[in-house]
């Protein structure tokens, strides 16, 4: 008898609605942190008068730094610790290794985070302009699954 290798069954991917909702929550958190940091950096008080100077480069540097910093913390470090970003935790999905369903490595999470920017800059505008229905992609050997899903 020839030995048969059993390939693990892949759990079903979460719905596109759950994935998009998680992405929107994560994006909203980064945007709100950018607005808060920018507003804080741009406020000056002179003679009891509060001024906000949005044209200042310090405001934009603080806003970009906060947005990218929170995004990194959320998508790389928090996901490394919990297998999910804040948006994924709220929507009941998580990130696993595609090969065996194990915990993602820090390097793969960093690659996935960078791929997200590439996807956002290149593919999202194309899909919006052409009104296509292409779904979000898994990248760098990581997969998004439901929180209770296991690989057999």
Image (cartoon, grey):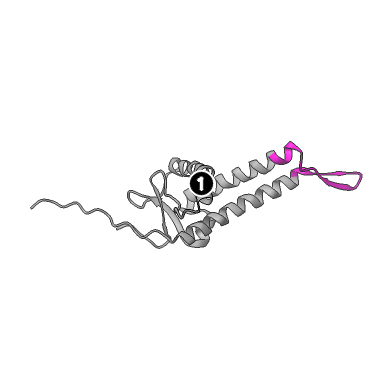
Q: Quadrant of the C terminus?
A: bottom left
Q: Is residue 41 left or right of residue 115?
A: right
Q: Position of residue 100 (x, y in %)?
A: 33, 51
- In the rendered image, the residue lying farthest to the right is 47
The residue positioned 66% from the left and 47% from the top of the image is 34
Mark 1, Cα crowd under 10 Å, few <14 / some 14-19 / many 20+, is few
Q: Is residue 83 visible?
A: yes
The magenta-colored residue range is 41-60
How many discs appear? 1
- In the rendered image, the residue lying farthest to the left is 1
The residue lying toward the viewer, choosing from 149 and 81, is 149
- The residue that mark 1 highlights is 126
Q: Is residue 95 left or right of residue 100?
A: right
Q: Is residue 130 left or right of residue 40?
A: left
The residue positioned 27% from the left and 55% from the top of the image is 8
- In the rendered image, the residue lying farthest to the front is 130
Q: Position of residue 147 (x, y in %)?
A: 43, 61
- Residue 44 drawn in magenta: yes
Q: Is residue 78 visible?
A: no
Q: Position of residue 24 (x, y in %)?
A: 56, 56
The residue positioned 70% from the left and 40% from the top of the image is 60
């Amino acid at each position: 008898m020839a030995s048969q290798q059993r390939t693990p069954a892949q759990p079903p991917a979460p719905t596109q609605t759950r994935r998009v909702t998680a992405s929107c929550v994560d994006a909203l958190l980064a945007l709100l942190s950018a607005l808060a940091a920018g507003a804080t950096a741009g406020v000056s008080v002179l003679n009891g008068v509060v001024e906000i100077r949005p044209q200042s480069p310090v405001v934009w540097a603080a806003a970009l730094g906060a947005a990218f910093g929170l995004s990194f913390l959320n998508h790389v470090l928090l996901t490394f610790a919990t297998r999910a970003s804040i948006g994924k935790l709220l929507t009941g999905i998580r990130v696993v290794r595609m090969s065996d369903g194990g915990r993602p490595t820090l390097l793969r999470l960093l690659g996935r985070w960078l791929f997200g920017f590439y996807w956002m800059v290149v593919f999202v505008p194309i899909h919006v302009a052409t009104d296509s229905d292409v779904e979000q992609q898994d990248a760098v050997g990581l997969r998004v699954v439901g929180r209770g899903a296991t690989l057999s």
